[in-house]
Amino acid sequence: MNLTENSIFITGGGSGIWRGFPETLHGKGNKVVISGRRKSALEEVGRAKPGIELVELDIENPKSITSVPNSLAKQHPELNVLINNAGIMKVDNVQNGSQGERYDVRNYWNHWKRWRQRSA
C-alpha cells in the first residue's frame, strides 16, 4: 500500500492503541476520516490533529450502520482505504437461547460486508 496521498476511513480511530493510526497517516499527507461511538474521544483527536474528519458511528445502532456508509460514499467518493478496528457485537447463542450477549471482537468481516453493500 502506498502510505501517502490516500483517502482513508478508519473505524474506531478515536481512542486506545488504534488512535495512532489516524494521527500517523494524516501526518504522511493522507486525507483521514475516523469514526467511533464516543463523540468526546473523536473531538479529542480533532483538537490534537486538525484536519482529521470525525464521524460518529455506533455499530450497535442499526440506523448508524445504515446511514454512515451512505453518507461517506456521498461526501467522500475518493475513499480508497478502509481500516477496521475492534468493536462491540451482540451475538445470539442458539444453544442456550440467550440473546444479545456482548462480545469485544475484531469484526472485520461484518464491517467490510456492510461497507461494500453500502458503497456499491
Image (cartoon, rainbow, N blue to C red):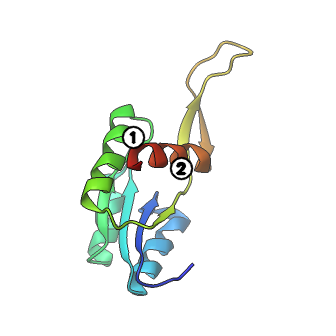
Residue ID at (52%, 66%)? 18
Query: In this view of the protein, which residue sits in the foreground, 55 or 114?
Result: 114
Q: Secondary structure at mark 2?
A: helix
Query: Percent position (x, y) of residue 109?
Result: 60, 46
Disc marking residue 65: 1
Q: Residues within 10 Å of mark 1 (few under 14, many from 20)?
A: some
- Of residues 35 and 116, the one nearer the viewer is 116
Question: Which residue is drawn at the image coordinates 66% and 12% (left, top)?
Answer: 97
Name the residue carrying label 2: 112
User: Does the CB distance between marks 2 and 1 fall below 8 Å?
Assistant: no
Residue 20 shown left or right of residue 48 in the figure = right
| Residue 72, quarter of the rendered image | bottom left
Residue type, numbered disc 2: Trp
Q: In the picture, which quadrant includes the N terminus?
A: bottom right
Asked if 30 appears above or below 119 in the picture, the reply is: below
> Could you give the CA–CA distance between mark 2 and mark 1, rounded to whole angstroms?
12 Å
Q: Quadrant of residue 47?
A: bottom left
In the rendered image, residue 75, in percent from the top left (x then y), is placed at 25, 59
Q: Residues within 10 Å of mark 2 (few under 14, many from 20)?
A: some
Q: Which amino acid lies under the numbered mark 1 shown in the image of this protein?
A: Ile
Q: Please tell me which of labels 2 and 1 falls first in the chain.
A: 1
Name the residue at 39% across, 80% down: 30
Q: Position of residue 31 (x, y in %)?
A: 35, 75
State whether residue 44 is above or below residue 62.
below
Of circles 2 and 1, which is in front? Answer: 2
Residue 68 pos. (x, y %): 33, 47
Above or below, 3 against 70 in this view is below
The image shows residue 119, relative to residue 33, as above or below, that is above
Q: Residue furthest front?
A: 120
Q: Is residue 46 left or right of residue 102?
A: left
